[in-house]
Structures are given as structure tokens and as C-alpha cells.
Amino acid sequence: MTTGPTSGNAMAPRRGPRGRHPSEADRAAVAVAVAGLAPVREMLIEHLHALQDRHGGLRAGHLVALAEVLRLAPVEVFEVASFYHHFEILEDTAPAPAPLTIRVCTGLPCQLAGGGALLDALAAAPPSGTRVAAAPCMGACHRAPACALGHDLVESATLTTVAAAVQSGPPALPSPPALDAYLAQGGYTALRTIRQAGDAGREAMLATLEAASLRGLGGAGFPTSRKWRLVLSQPGPRHMVVNADEGEPGTFKDRYCLETEPHRVLEGMLIAAHAVGAEACWIYLRDEYPHLHHALRREIAALDAAGIAELPIHLRRGAGAYICGEETALLESLEGRRGYPRHKPPFPGEQGLFGRPTLIHNVETLWFLPDVLGEPDGAARFAGHGRRGRQGLRFFSVSGRVRDPGEKLAPAGVTARELIEEFSGGMAKGHRLAAYLPGGASGGILPASMADLPLDFGTLDSVGCFVGSGAVVILSDQDDLAEAVRNLVRFFRDESCGQCTPCRVGTAKADALLRPPRWDRTLLEELAAAMADGSICGLGQAAMNPVRSLLRHMPEAVP
């Protein structure tokens, strides 16, 4: 039996390393762009941001040079760069893109406010030196329609305001309050008191959280005390992660909390980190909020300088992938990988970031911690705010056909009708309530006849919906409900990470089935069941909720 080459030089030994090699110019360009960043795998996405921010895109040669810096295979860098929507890979010979990209939001609240017409008009006649693209929700649903000029947000956008922003720059968003202002109001008193109590105060904190019935407010509603106990039951070292990657269409509560009281969130983070003995904190902030990224960098530095932090705080940018709001996909992203959700168990509290026990909290949950744990009657005061037998407060992001859209701090158990009438100034002029989304794109859709149901975790189970992140989008008699559902399904189609077949194929199939003239109701129900049963994470499991709830509660709106 012959095992070597049989003829000629068909199997001649390869000389030199395989694959493409970076030029010296590529190496030099990468070295300048990523100067100051640690050359480690977990920093890959930060390196990609640095390259794209400097060059307007990711040249193929630069990616190969970056792989060399990080000691990764080029395919590992390319697969990550191509996964995230905010990265644009360019061939080395491709012409440079337009200096400025205008991204117009296609989220449902922006579509209700004329975002589709704005996108069409800009695409038909782009301002000089720009290119125009569609983009998912930007967290400006209360000031719709929204668009982004490069990294800068333009709210309540029109052709006139966009043209003006292209010429002279978009209006600056307000800068969040600084550390000195928060300290002057008694900020970090709760943290100081808790640290002084040491380990002896830990059980009292857990009991207080249980009495307050404080839950994770990112969507799942898992009791905070149970999450802390799980992390504490595992051997160290432990990590603390803040999930600030809200991407659910209609949601902007994290943005509101970080714009108005960033140090309240940071204090909550440090309290939670102390409670579970975390050795480092990580904040994963969605890339659509660059003004918050700048502010948080400044305020984290101020905390370090003041000696308040007492542990490392790492700030990381997302890159436009909705799936990274899922906690295990977020962990993958923090480790410098594609945002693929992990199978559970193990849960992050057992095996999370870098394989260590990790406490993950949403921004809103942390916002409440200083009051709940820092006041003598904090638990009772918090729990006493609920309505209809529910406990606590929460933020509701109200958008759509109301007079005063915005972030509303309201009692758990409030109804959609109360959010409209008591908190949002009533329906917009000339509009009558027809339907509403109780929990963003994934929470389903309910008719006006169900606007008196309490909104809280578990209260909508019997009608096949959920409150999730508290994104309440109001629809009127002037809206096409079937088209609204199509918009939501297109979002899930575009945001599926592609890891599992039921979600990857199912969302594309659903989008095709929802096209005119007729919906195949039987096939849609079968597809929804298959996706709910077979998908790895909540995206695929909930992607058909808008379809199922429209079929169930408003069949007259189905074509």
C-alpha cells in the first residue's frame, strides 16, 4: 500500500504559512487603529470597532493583519466581523464607501410615524456624500421616526432636519449627570453602608430583596434574590455583568435610566457585585447609544479616581446584534465570539463569563437597588406600589399613537388603558385605540377589548402574551394590524442568529407566508408550534407570538 506521493510534485511540501498574508501597510494601519487595546481574544470586537471607526469599514487585509495581532486564525476574525450588523467588510480593491451613512429606523413605532416614507425619500435622493440604509430599532421610539447619521442620532426626523444635520451635524443629546451631582444628592450612601456591614449583612440583603419581590426586569422576570443565591452557591472567582443591550423594538428604558441617573445604575451594579463577591464588573452597552458610551467612560474613570469602584469595571460596545440581549449570547460576545446563545444548563450563575459564575442584571433592576436596599423601609415602599394584587414599580416604554409617548414609571399591574390615559395624555388626536403590543415585538398583540388586563409577569399567560421588557406600543384604528405583524416578523427574520434551524428557516418561512394576498392560517400555526418547541433561545420561541395572537384575538384583521 502506497502512502506517499505517487507522481510528480502533486504532494510537494508547502512552503511558508497557509492562507493570505497581510502587507506591511495593513500591519501598520492596524497597529495605529488598535493602539492601547490589549491583544487578547476577548477584545476582538473592540478591535473591530477601532478599525471601523478609523477607516469607515473593515478591509479584508486589515482583518488578516488583526488576526495576526490577536494570534487567531483569519477565519475566526472574519466570522465574528461578518456576524454583527454594524461591521462592514470591504474588499481591499473596493471603492471607499460614502463618507456618511444615514440609517433610517424600520422599527414599528418609527413606521407608524412615517419612517418608511422617510427611508424611501432619502434613498431616492441621498444628500451629497451620503448613502442610505434601513436599520432596526434605535431606542428612540418615543421620538419617532429616528435615523442615525454615522453614530449620531437624529430624533423626530424629517427630510429637512436630516439635511440640516448632514450639513452642520446633528443636535447634541444631553449629557448625563456627573459623579459630583450624584454625590451631592446622597449618592453611594447605600453602597457605603452595605460595604461597611460586610459579609454579615448579606443574608439581610437577600431577605430584603425577597420582601420587595424585585425581579429581573429585562424580560424574564426571574426573582433577584434567587439569582444572587445561585451565584453565591458557586465557588469563586465570580463576575458581574450589566446587560445594557436593549434591542427589543419599542424599548428605550435602559437608555432613559442611563441618560438621567447613570450613577444610580452604577451604584446598583456595585451593590450587586459586592453582594455576590464579584471580582470584576462588565457593562455591555448597545452600540446605538454612543453618547452613553462616552458618558459612562467618563463616569467610570471618575469612580476610579474617587476610590469608589474598588474593583475593575470594563465597558464594552455591542455591535448591532439583537440576539446579544439574550444573556448567554451576550457572554459569547463579551468573550470575543459570535453572539450564539448557549444551551442551558449550565446557567450563567453556575458557568458564565469565561466559565466562571456570573451575575447578569438588566439596567432597570440595578436602578431600583439603591432605594430597595438603602432605605430602612425600602422593600415595603417598593412592593407597596403595585396595583391589582401585583407588587412593585417598573418602567414602561410607551410609544405609538399616544399624545405623550415616553418612559413611564408606573405600578406593576397597571393596564394599557391606564398607561394611555393616566401616563401618556390619552390617544393621539384623531386616533382610537385598536390594539397594543404589551411587551415589544416578542410579547404578542392584543385588541382594545383587552386593554384592561394588568401588565406584569405572568398576567398575560392565559391570552398567549407577555409583558417582557415593558415596551408598550399603541396601535389605532388607522393602522393596518396585519402589516404591523409583518413588520415584527421581518425584524425577527433579520435578527435570527442562524444557529438553530427552527429559527433560521422558520422566520424566513414565516415572512414568506405573511405576504399578500392570503395567510395560510393552518400552516402558520404549525410553523409557530415547531419554532416554539425547537428553537434554542427566546428569539425563535417568541418570534411567532405576534402572528399567533393576531390569529387568535383579531381574526378579522387577518387577510
Image (spheres, rainbow, N blue to C red):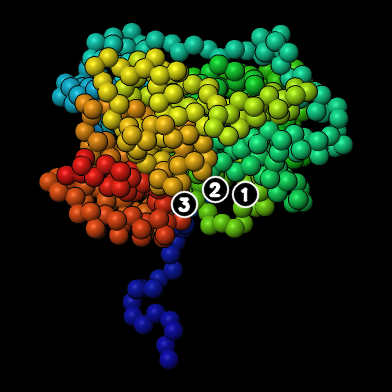
Q: Nearer the viewer, mark 2 or mark 3?
A: 3
Residue sitting farthest toward the left: 517
State the mark number for residue 328: 2
Mark 1 lies on a secondary structure that is: loop
Query: Horizontally, is 216 left or right of 339 in the view?
Result: right
- The amino acid sitting under disc 1 is Pro
Q: In this rendering, is residue 222 above or below 104? A: below
Tag 3 or tag 2, which sits nearer the N-term? 2
- The amino acid sitting under disc 2 is Thr
Image marks 2 and 3: residues in contact by CB distance under 8 Å:
yes
Of residues 335 and 182, the one drawn nearer to the viewer in this rendering: 182
Query: Which quadrant holds the C terminus?
Result: top left
Please report the residue visible at 61 percent of the width from the left and 52 percent of the height from the top.
Answer: 347
Q: In this rendering, is residue 46 above or below 515? A: above
Of residues 312 and 359, the one drawn nearer to the viewer in this rendering: 359
Please report the residue visible at 49 percent of the width from the left and 41 percent of the height from the top.
Answer: 459
Image marks 2 and 1: residues in contact by CB distance under 8 Å:
yes
- Residue assigned mark 3: 537
Numbered disc total = 3
Q: Position of residue 170 (x, y in %)?
A: 37, 12
Q: Position of residue 80 (x, y in %)?
A: 45, 46
- Residue assigned mark 1: 348
Image marks 1 and 3: residues in contact by CB distance under 8 Å:
no
State the mark number for residue 320: none
Tag 1 or tag 2, which sits nearer the N-term? 2
